[in-house]
Amino acid sequence: MRVKVTLYVAGKVFDEVVEARDYQDAKQTALARNPTAKAISATNTL
């Protein structure tokens, strides 16, 4: 499924859309792409 992960880094909030099997996997993938960021939320996108 496609998951929109909201990330926070250096005072800025941005979204990363990833393909993952569940929300935890989506957060892990988004953080791998942005290692200094903090995951705020993950929501399903259609």
Image (cartoon, rainbow, N blue to C red):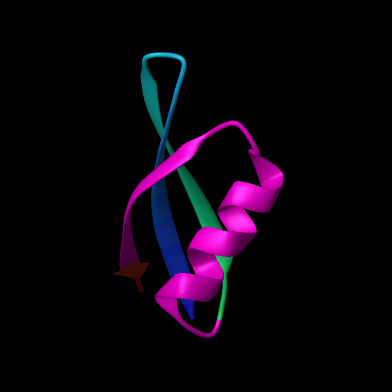
User: Is residue 1 a member of the stretch shown in magenta?
Assistant: no
Q: Is residue 45 above or below residue 37?
A: below
Residue drawn at point x = 51 percent, y = 55 percent:
17
The location of residue 28, given as percent across then percent down, is 58, 62
Q: Is residue 17 above or below residue 15?
A: below
Nearer to us in this view, 44 or 35: 35
The location of residue 6, given as percent across then percent down, is 37, 45
The location of residue 11, given as percent across then percent down, is 37, 14
Q: Is residue 33 above or below residue 45?
A: above
Residue drawn at point x = 52 percent, y = 34 percent:
37
**Quadrant (top left, top right, bottom left, bottom right) of the C terminus:** bottom left
> In the image, 3: left or right of 43?
right
**Tally of numbered discs:** 0
Furthest residue toward top: 11
> In the image, 4: left or right of 19?
left
**To which quarter of the image does residue 18 belong?**
bottom right
Question: Start and end of the magenta stretch?
Answer: 21-43
Q: Is residue 13 above or below residue 44?
A: above
Furthest residue toward bottom: 21
Residue drawn at point x = 44 percent, y = 39 percent:
38
